[in-house]
Amino acid sequence: MDNIVFFITRKVFAKCSFEFCNRIVSTVHVSSTVVLASLSVQDWSCPVCPLASKSSPKQMQTLAVSVAYLIYDLVCCLFDEKVKIDNTVHHLVSIVGLVAGLAYQWCGSEIVAALSITEISSPFLHLRELLKELGFRDTDLNLAADIAFAVIFAFARMIGGPYLTYAMALGLQIVSAFWFYKIARMVMYKLAKRTSSINITKTH
């Protein structure tokens, strides 16, 4: 899907740079990701609830769309004039993390929330650069895009980020408690079985 959008963009904006067209694709992607993430929220009074739960179909769809885009963007980065190692590593780590989320189908609420926090300011980040190439550098419109990006980024990362960190820590503790219960139950069963076997042997 991202490839199709890119080719259409290249046709429409034939005189614009490769990066310009790629930023348009990125803007379309991040906007769709935020919309899908919003639609996957089950309870807006607690956006990351239920914690440490099985991923819903909508959450899985959001993760799948994001993985597809990251693979596309990684390929685009390799066609850049100068391949940036840090950017490549960022893409690879993100892809592995989201693929793990898809494979295990667990903690969908927390992963989608993390996606929303990291992506919600991206459309304005791309808009800043798009406006510059369109000839709107140092204009009021470009300044408005700068301010919108700064405000949304600050709100998402400085308020949403700590909230998500708390929620994910709580979710991790819930998962740990669940597995502790399962392991403790297994050990108790083994000990009880062994004690029963010893008692039967003594009886005989």
Image (cartoon, rainbow, N blue to C red):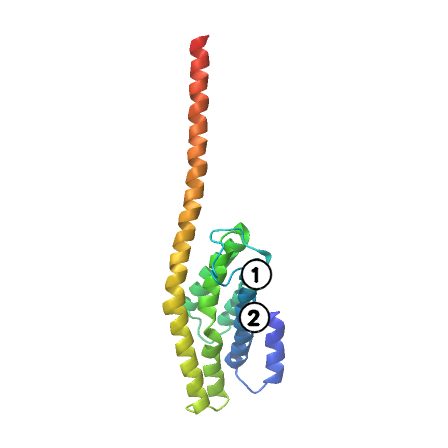
- Report which residue position mark 2 lands on: 32
Residue at image x 59%, y 71%? 2
Residue 73 x/y as whole percent: 52, 69
Q: How crowded is mark 2: few (under 14 residues within 10 Å), some or many (20 or more)?
A: some
Say which label, 2 or 1, has the lower sequence index.
Answer: 2
Choose between 16 and 134: the one closer to the eye: 134
Choose between 183 and 40: the one closer to the eye: 40
**Left or right of 13 in this view: 147:** left
**Left or right of 180 in this view: 18:** right
User: Which residue is situated farthest in the top direction here?
Assistant: 204
**Left or right of 173 in this view: 95:** right
- Report which residue position mark 1 lands on: 64
Q: Distance between the residues labelled 2 and 1?
A: 12 Å
Q: In this view, does 130 lie above or below 104?
A: below
Residue at image x 61%, y 75%? 5
Front: mark 2 or 1: 2
* Mark 2 residue type: Ser
Which labelled disc corresponds to residue 194? Answer: none
Q: Pick the quarter of the image with the N terminus.
A: bottom right
Choose between 57 and 47: the one closer to the eye: 47
Q: In this view, does 186 lie above or below 83?
A: above
Image-quadrant location for residue 145: bottom left
Residue 189 x/y as whole percent: 46, 28
Residue at image x 43%, y 21%? 194
Residue 154 x/y as whole percent: 38, 73
Image-quadrant location for residue 188: top left
* Mark 1 residue type: Ala
User: Which SS class for mark 2?
Assistant: helix
